[in-house]
Image: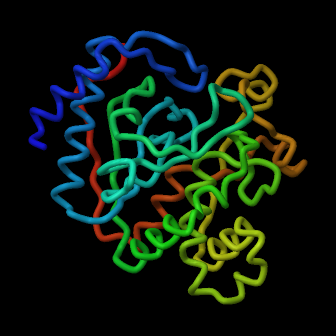
Amino acid sequence: MPARRWFISLVLALCCAGAHAGSACISHEIGPDQLRAASQLTLTVIAELEAADRPLAIVSRVGQDLSQYGQRYSHAGLVVRDHPAGRWTVIHELNHCGSADSGIYAEGMLNVFLDDMVRYEAHLLWPDDRLTEALLRALADEAPRRLHNPEYSVISRYGSESTQNSTAWLAELIGYSMAAEFPGCRRSPSQPRQIARCALDRQGFTPDSIRISYGKRVMGGLFSANASFVDHPLRSRLSGNYEVVTVRSILDWLRPQSIAEREIVEAHDRG
């Protein structure tokens, strides 16, 4: 479908729709500026994906301002070209309205960028052929849901058995897809998350260290609605340095196994 016709259909479908925006799940009408900015970013991202002509990519967005933690992108998922739900469907974990539970979603690209963005910026990274094929096999094998833990914590510790966040889920999905290269990691087929983390460790994945002050942790704020610090060791809680999976740690780890990446910035920030 030509881009103009696709855009007109998209506007007609969504101009009067309500949305659940951000982690607080605030229901509101989508304003024309928000729709315009999200639509333009969607068109630009899809144009990049079409030009690359690859089966999948990792797409990241700026849904929260995490600059105080040294982070640019707050969320990432897999975007798949040939998906039953439609061309360029995003597969990702989302938590339910700031609560302590989550689900796995297959969504159109526009939905991803309508989620109350702080800045209309995106990042695309295309894995190399070997990793792309491994990820496609993992998707066909229902790995996204088998790796999912619905107990959500935005500050989930890397390797936690009790909680998971969206970036940890994505890292584990990528790790699980690599596990065939490490036979020793597949000794517990009934425990896919352990298989995934074994492969991540073998591949040299390193989580980020995020500094959260005691005052910030006690008073809440950014992490108050859906954060659990109890699965972090005492030394982390005393020092305020928490090991978590971030978009940055995933992208840094994957760059040697990728063929290209793009940063996409639209000149429209939320006021």
Q: Determine the residue located farthest toward the front in the rendered image.
A: 84
Q: Is residue 29 left or right of residue 143?
A: left
Residue 145, given in percent of the width and then of the height, sits at 62, 56
Give the total number of marks visible in the rendering.
0
Q: Is residue 9 left or right of residue 199?
A: left
| Res 208 visible | no
In this rendering, the answer to whether 260 lies above or below 242 is below
Residue 267, given in percent of the width and then of the height, sits at 22, 27
Q: Quadrant of the C terminus?
A: top left
In this rendering, the answer to whether 65 lies above or below 47 is above
Q: Residue at x 58, y 70 (%)?
A: 175
Q: Is residue 107 left or right of residue 70?
A: left
Residue 174: image quadrant is bottom right
Residue 264, given in percent of the width and then of the height, sits at 26, 43
In this rendering, the answer to whether 123 lies above or below 10 is below
Residue 68: image quadrant is top right
Residue 185: image quadrant is bottom right
Q: Determine the residue located farthest toward the bottom in the rendered image.
A: 183
Q: Residue at x 59, y 64 (%)?
A: 143
| Res 145 visible | yes
Residue 27, given in percent of the width and then of the height, sits at 52, 13
